[in-house]
Image (spheres, helix red, strand yellow):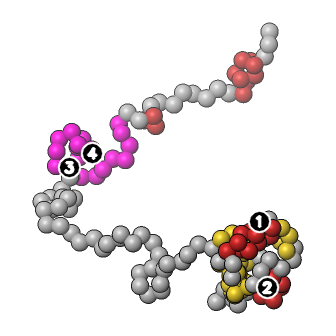
């Protein structure tokens, strides 16, 4: 059974990882994942044990314990079904979109405006500059005059 080991110290080696897991059973393989660009550890790896029950024993005993200065996480590894170069990853049902004849807005030229009265933006002018502010917006109302400091002091004074 394959186990995911996360939050590894960057200094952790495969021999140290094997030593940690070897007390629970026979290790088939152990690997630490490294970044291709920098060559540094990405902080996780995989350990494969021969027996499923020994692997569950590892999860129960090693998960959330300190190992080389970090609290590591040990879980059952998920199966990775993606194959590089074959459209792996993402949504498998995704298809490239081809325009349909007679589809959405096919009879209207681009920028011709709304086709139905009462639709969204039907009150918008079709030609000329487009106003970004409605006529009776908050900004078009007259501003009240600001009170001076003397008036504020008079108001705040308790008599």
Cα separation, mark 4 vs mark 3, equals: 7 Å
Which label was assigned to residue 18?
2
Cα separation, mark 3 vs mark 1, equals: 64 Å
- In this view, the residue in front, 102 or 49, is 49
Q: Residues within 10 Å of mark 4 (few under 14, many from 20)?
A: few
Which residues lie in the magenta part? 115-135
Number of numbered discs present? 4
Q: Is residue 156 above or below residue 54?
A: above
Cα separation, mark 4 vs mark 1, equals: 61 Å
Q: Earlier in the sequence, mark 4 or mark 1?
A: 1
- Residue 3 visible? The answer is no
Q: Earlier in the sequence, mark 3 or mark 1?
A: 1
Cα separation, mark 2 vs mark 3, equals: 68 Å
Q: Earlier in the sequence, mark 1 or mark 2?
A: 2
Which label was assigned to residue 121?
4
Q: Earlier in the sequence, mark 4 or mark 2?
A: 2
The residue shown at (86%, 70%) is: 66
Which label was assigned to residue 114?
3
Secondary structure beneath dot 1 equals: helix
Magenta segment's dominant SS is loop
Q: Is residue 141 above or below residue 6?
A: above
Secondary structure beneath dot 3 equals: loop
Q: Residues within 10 Å of mark 3 (few under 14, many from 20)?
A: some
> How far from the left and from the top, in percent, is residue 67?
85, 74
The residue shown at (27%, 45%) is: 121
Q: Which residue is mark 1?
A: 60
């Amino acid at each position: 059974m394959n186990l995911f080991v996360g939050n590894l110290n960057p200094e952790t080696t495969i021999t140290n990882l094997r030593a940690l897991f070897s007390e629970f059973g026979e290790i088939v393989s152990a690997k630490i994942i490294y970044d291709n660009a920098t060559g540094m550890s990405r902080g996780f790896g995989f350990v494969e044990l021969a027996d499923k029950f020994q692997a569950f024993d590892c999860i129960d005993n090693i998960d959330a314990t300190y190992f080389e200065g970090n609290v590591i996480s040990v879980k059952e590894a998920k199966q990775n079904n993606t194959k590089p170069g074959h459209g792996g990853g993402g949504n498998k049902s995704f298809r490239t979109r081809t325009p349909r004849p007679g589809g959405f807005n096919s009879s209207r030229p681009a920028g011709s405006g709304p086709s139905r009265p009462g639709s969204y933006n039907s009150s918008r002018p079709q030609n000329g500059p487009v106003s970004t502010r409605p006529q009776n917006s908050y900004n078009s109302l007259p501003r009240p005059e600001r009170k001076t400091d003397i008036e504020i002091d008079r108001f705040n004074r308790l008599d």
